[in-house]
DNA sequence: CGTGTGTATTTTGTATACAAGATACACCAA
DNA sequence: TTGGTGTATCTTGTATACAAAATACACACG
């Protein structure tokens, strides 16, 4: 989740000291997303703390927050495993995510400033360029940013947090989900529609597009699970 | 969040050994909900571990999960505080919760068995009896159960998890928010409508009622924040 | 051979120790 | 008095030590 740790936001002077705990959590999150830690596999504490060069205390604390985020499972006295997502899990996440982004779409149209809308349009244009070059990885990253960005325009912190959480859990799946050329093209065209609706500030329409987009996302990833 | 800790569900033989960590987390959660730990106040580690009779290790792990759940804020090197909800926070949570329960309503009508529907109706009837006696506290508890129960009928674990998380954060607010007699009556009547729609398996209608119910909940609690 | 039982080894859970940082406070100077 | 500086004290962060499980494994017995 958004992990309520105060990071002195908006203070450029204060040097940010991230606790080992946080660093470790971020690190493991990455390891999971990038597939170095396989879903279902045990997390070898002894091995990892050696690799990371930290003691068990911050490491285990990190595991606890990752458990609360739903990325790992802690089995009492039996160690932790990277959580494995069943197709049903993924489906349920996309079902919820669809509604959340639908709401985000509706609210953004009401609450975003013109500047924010423009910024998102520019982001979209960068995505288009990447699509033309079929530059998958950077496209993927910007895509995440686009969805996060839209959620931010909703001015609803809870919505952002929940969206962020689900997105985090799905990242790995989508990361490997090498959707076909067709699917990619379809997704891009859906994004076109989003941007149009957002510019027109047509919340209902944008919401509908978001819901539909996520519904189709399921079809695009279902086979890669 | 649902705190991915394996509790050997569905195994009546295995004696459940809850780790200190989990017990402490539950305990602190209760302390927060019941108001023994005030929002905004610092969590005195030294004092609490003494009261609880545990060492710092499991205690601090518990704090981490509570932070991830959004109940506590950890300020690096400065200790933790019980998270304080601004009216905007509460509003944003209800905004999201409204959508989630709307979805829950829609899905339940499609996916619940007749038995499950009947069980929820019975729960509703018990609530009615409590309402007639104006027995606030037990009513409140059953109300939570009702909403949780409806979410369960959606067969969507992610939805249940998110709903549970938000409900947990709001518990304290709604707990103290002693709505007026009118407000209570209105809520009861809304519940009547829910049950009707559920029995008729009219998902769209139930969804609408849920969304509206949560919107009105905001009006019912806004002043008690 | 397979199965079970007891023991050794590893892993996990919790407590404690130590270090580093933050806070409180007293004392001095203007 | 007020403001600032240095020191003492208390809190927090991290590492380690110890205890309790769980797992692996070897050996005996059927």
Image: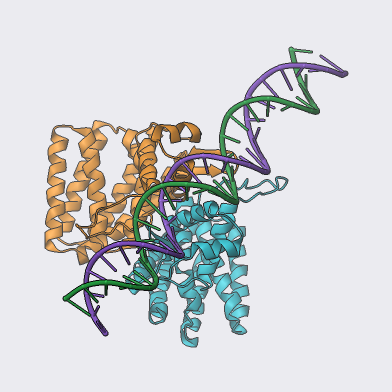
Chain colours: A cyan, B orange, C purple, D green
Of residues B174 and B78, the one nearer the viewer is B78
Q: Quadrant of the C terminus of chain A?
A: bottom left
* Residue B187, visible in the rendered structure: no
* Residue A209, visible in the rendered structure: yes
Lateral position of residue A189 relative to residue B225, left or right: right
Q: Give the x, y percent position of residue B39.
A: 45, 35
Tell me the residue at 49%/78% (across/down).
Answer: A176
Q: Give the x, y percent position of residue B164.
A: 33, 51
Q: Give the x, y percent position of residue A94.
A: 39, 68
Lateral position of residue B57 relative to residue B33, left or right: right
Q: Give the x, y percent position of residue B3.
A: 38, 54
User: Does B125 sit above or below residue A144?
Assistant: above
Tell me the residue at 22%/33% (across/down).
Answer: B136
Label tally: 0
Identify the residue at the far bottom of this view: A181
User: Does B210 sit above or below residue C21?
Assistant: below
Corner quadrant of residue D21: bottom left
Lateral position of residue B84 relative to residue B9, left or right: right
């Amino acid at each position: 989740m958004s992990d309520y740790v105060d990071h002195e936001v908006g203070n450029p002077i204060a040097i940010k000291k991230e606790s080992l705990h946080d660093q470790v959590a971020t690190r493991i999150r990455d390891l999971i997303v990038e597939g170095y830690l396989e879903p279902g596999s045990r997390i070898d504490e002894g091995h990892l703390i050696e690799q990371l060069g930290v003691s068990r205390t911050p490491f285990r604390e990190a595991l606890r927050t990752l458990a609360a985020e739903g990325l790992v499972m802690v089995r009492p006295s039996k160690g932790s495993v990277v959580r494995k997502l069943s197709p049903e899990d993924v489906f349920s996440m996309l079902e919820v995510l669809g509604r959340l982004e639908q709401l985000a779409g509706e609210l953004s149209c009401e609450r975003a400033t013109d500047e924010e809308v423009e910024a998102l349009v520019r982001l979209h244009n960068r995505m288009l360029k990447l699509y033309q070059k079929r530059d998958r990885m950077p496209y993927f990253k910007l895509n995440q940013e686009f969805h996060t960005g839209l959620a931010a325009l909703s001015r609803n912190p809870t919505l952002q947090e929940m969206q962020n959480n689900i997105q985090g859990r799905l990242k790995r799946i989508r990361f490997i989900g090498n959707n076909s050329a067709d699917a990619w093209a379809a997704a891009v065209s859906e994004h076109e529609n989003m941007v149009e609706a957002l510019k027109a500030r047509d919340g209902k329409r944008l919401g509908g597009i978001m819901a539909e987009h996520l519904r189709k996302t399921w079809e695009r990833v279902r086979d890669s699970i």
